[in-house]
Amino acid sequence: MSAASLTPVTPPAPMHPLREFWTYFSANRGAVMGLIIVAVVLLVALFAPLLAPHAPNITNTTVFLKPPAWQSGGSSAYLLGTDAIGRDILSRLMYGARLSLVIGLAVVSVSVIVGTVLGLMAGFFRGIFEIAIMRMMDIILTLPSLLLAIVIVAILGPGLMNAMLAVSIVVLPHYVRITRAAVITETSRDYVTAARMNGASRFRLMFSEILPNCTAPLIVQASLGVSTAILDAAALGFLGLGAQPPSPEWGTMLADAREFVLRAWWVVTFPGLAILITVLAFNLLGDGLRDAFDPKLKR
């Protein structure tokens, strides 16, 4: 037997967690495309004052309902045309990206924080407290989400803040249920038992031991929740219950353009496409995150 055959084989070094995550995430081409689109929308929202060719609320009655630049009668000064009172649609879409992202991120932030705390308490304390919280969440889930949001806004009054609060309440049960299920699973683990035997307080068990191991499903649900929040807020804006004119919110732009659908297709098409592309991008991103975080889906 040769000496080379007796040489021990060195096992490969373990892959860095971030590199491993990117390996599984990048295997999903749709997720990468969604990430690119989300990054582009974010950059457009951040640099809207520099990129927008016109102020979003400046009106010019001499160019009302002007078609896009490539259509007969269009102008290079208004690449996507103008609306019924001469406002540049491209500029309003860029500023509208700011509102849509702020709505989505604010709604998800509030829902994640409140839902995580309620889910932790329900999963950790159990008993009557758990029953009360989960039955309340079940009641919210039994009602159509958009109808419930409309009722809440109708009670509080139309406006962007009230619309965000209504959407936050509508999507809250998803985070509560996910956190509670993860907490129930994690409390039976050996590391939680060891921490409890070492004298760890309930607060430490909940937030230092259990919560960090529940973040993966919450991150996935949050990325999907941004698209839901943007879509629901646009629906409320379309009904006149969300952002109020002259705010360049995409749903409000659709509402203002309803009577010009047959005369000027661009005033409806471009805000609708902005909502469609952004929502689709966040959904694709969420699917990629789910595949990367779920070990059962890793090949």
Image: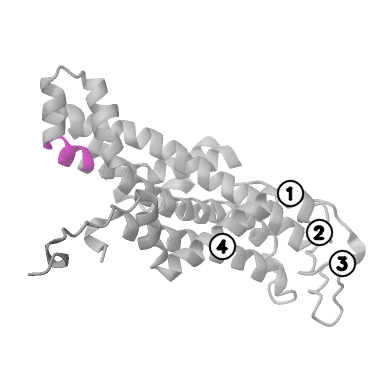
Residue that lies at the very extreme toward the bottom in this rendered image: 72
Q: Residue at x 78, y 56 (%)?
A: 52
In this view, the mark in front (3 or 1):
3
Task: Write the start and end of the magenta stretch as one range.
Answer: 182-189
Q: Which residue is mark 4?
A: 37
- Determine whether the residue tagged by mark 4 lies in a helix, strand or loop: helix
| Amino acid tagged 2 | Arg
Vertical placement of residue 143 versus 264, above or below = above
94 to the left or right of 77: left
Q: Can residue 56 be seen at all in this image of the molecule?
A: no
What type is the residue that disc 3 sits on?
Ala
Sort mark 2 into few (<14), some (14-19) or many (20+) by Cα contacts within 10 Å: many
Can residue 207 be seen at all in this image of the molecule?
yes
Image quarter where the C terminus lies is: bottom left
- Give the mark nearer the N terminus: 3 vs 4: 4
Q: Which residue is mark 1?
A: 246
Residue contact between numbered discs 2 and 1, judged by CB atoms under 8 Å: yes
